[in-house]
Image (cartoon, grey):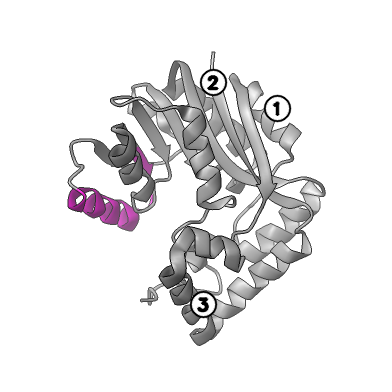
Amino acid sequence: MLNPTLNLQTAPGHQVLAAAGKRILRPGGRAATEKLFQWADFKPGETVLELAAGFGDSAIALAKRYGLYVVAIEKNPDSVARARTNVAAAGLSDRIEIIEGDIFDLDRLGKQFDYVLAEAILTMQSPSGKAKILQGVRDRLKPGGKFLSHELLAQNNESEIHQVLSQVIRVNAAPYSKSNWIAAFETAGLQVQQHQTGIMGLLTIRQMLHDEGITGTALILWNILTKPLLRQRIVQMRQVFNRYKQDLGYIIICAQRL
């Protein structure tokens, strides 16, 4: 059901997509995230800090599949409440802690982790914001710990894409090129070990079917068809994605604190 308090004209793009029923909001979809997890080579009992945890879906998957202990930080109080409910329903309250907090203030956590996970977070920050978060990530990793990142890629026309994308999704979206992402990580003291790039299929039927399943995709399409304001915003986003389809993609990076 559509949130009656959500202003679809001004809401950030990720909230609009969530209102349509989209659960996977990562530019490379489930497949790119799975590749990140393969690179991580998790061991049971290791610790993960997840940034911007949303409803706790990723934290629950990590704890269930790999036997990890997860601390997940989320700023939105409603999302925090829902995430805690989801964690309790999954019977994982002993393995997952949901903290209400700001990803710009990671020092307050006061401990270090084997991994930090952030997906579709850094793209939405200014260059100075990216640098601050990356420094916080570096400080929260144990020596030798790994940062797992999944972000939007601008292979060319970074400045133009930043301007157009920010207008359509109502967020200061500034995707970097591959070389600029790697440089930002290494400037923060995070040595890139592995990376992969690919096409950005967030609103393609093929990727939605893979990410959301047949039932989830049908629900998204129904909501788009029957809710005019929702349809208007999503069509605008899709037009921009198509306009820059040769330049927009995803990048996943596994980087290590030395």
Instruction: Please tell me whether mark 2 or mark 1 is closer to you in this view.
Output: 2
What amino acid does circle 3 point to? Leu
Rendering coords of residue 72 (x, y %): 35, 40
Indicate whether residue 89 is drawn in magenta. Answer: yes
Residue at 44%, 27% in the rendered image: 41
Badge 2 crowding class, 10 Å Cα cut-off, few under 14, some 14 to 19, many 20 or more, is many
Asked which secondary structure carries label 3, the reply is helix
Where 194 sits versus 221, above or below? above
Q: Which residue is drawn at 64% across and 52% down?
A: 173
* Disc assigned to residue 183: 1
Q: Is residue 205 left or right of residue 143?
A: right
In the rendered structure, find residue 221 and report the number of the disc placed on it: 3
| Type of secondary structure dominating the magenta stretch | helix
- Quote the CA–CA distance across marks 2 and 3: 40 Å
Give the mark, 2 or 3, whose residue is nearer the N terminus. 3
User: Reading the chain from its start, which is encountered first: label 2 or label 1?
Assistant: 1
Kindly identify the amino acid type of the residue bearing the numbered disc 1: Ala
Cα distance between the residues tagged 2 and 1: 14 Å
Task: State which region is magenta.
Answer: 72-90
- Location of mark 2 (residue): 256
